Image: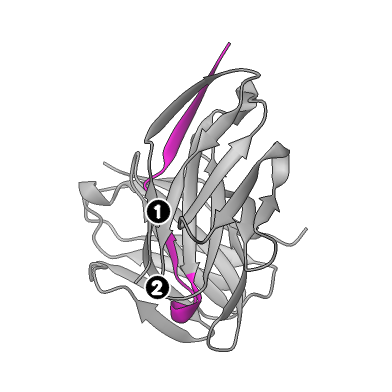
Amino acid sequence: AQSVTQLDSHVSVSEGTPVLLRCNYSSSYSPSLFWYVQHPNKGLQLLLKYTSAATLVKGINGFEAEFKKSETSFHLTKPSAHMSDAAEYFCVVSDTGTASKLTFGTGTRLQVTL
Amino acid sequence: DAMVIQNPRYQVTQFGKPVTLSCSQTLNHNVMYWYQQKSSQAPKLLFHYYDKDFNNEADTPDNFQSRRPNTSFCFLDIRSPGLGDAAMYLCATSRRTGAIANYGYTFGSGTRLTVV
């Protein structure tokens, strides 16, 4: 079985300050891990993904995430927040043992203030 | 550009009146999924097609059905929509090669369903 826990339902940062969105996962097999972003009334956009290559993954819009197997974590970071980053972020796991299934975390709403 | 297209973007239907949502893809992916996302919640998988094989999630209500007439199209049918079925419905695709390898998940922009 696979699961994802997003540790914060809401994160608020000031524009220009670092962003940290936390995610822990559980998986019986070698997982693939993803971060998706969803702006209001929009579909899901892939930010980045980890698929057993480099543990530090760089994505779009300056985001990156580090896969830490010992901590079962896949936290999303960005050095400097922009107003346009305000959105809902989902951490997602795909368990290669049960292919074709994505399991979503409950989401973290990122608020960016001036 | 290759993509996943959902029509319509917004759908209003009457309580109990059957409604169909559509999804098309130009990626030639062999797996297509339907997710339901209610307000302020994570997307929930309803079912998926692996080629022509239909895979229903155990807790998907019987009220929800799906059809995949060819590789490019997949439909979500709600036979008798209730107020609780109001949600964003997301279509996604992926390319599956073999038993465990699954690549390139791509989501459409979604259809927001309102039931009146």
Q: Is mark 2 on a helix, strand or loop?
A: strand
CB atoms of marks 2 and 1 within 8 Å: no
Q: For mark 1, name the chain.
A: B
Q: Which of marks 1 and 2 precedes in the sequence? A: 1
Report the span colored magenta: A95-114
- At which x and y percent is residue A65? 61, 48
Q: How crowded is mark 2: few (under 14 residues within 10 Å), some or many (20 or more)?
A: many
> Is residue B45 visible in the rendered structure shown here?
yes
Q: For the residue marked with disc 2, what is the amino acid?
A: Ser
Q: Same chain for the residues at labels 2 and 1, yes or no?
A: yes
Badge number at residue B66? 2
Residue B96: quadrant of the picture: bottom right
Where residue B61 appears, x then y in whole percent?
A: 23, 67
Q: Nearer the viewer, residue A45 or A50?
A: A50
Q: What amino acid is at disc 1?
A: Pro
Q: Is residue B9 above or below residue A85?
A: below
Kindly report the distance in space between the C-alpha atoms of the residues bearing marks 2 and 1: 17 Å
Q: In this view, does A18 lie above or below B19?
A: above
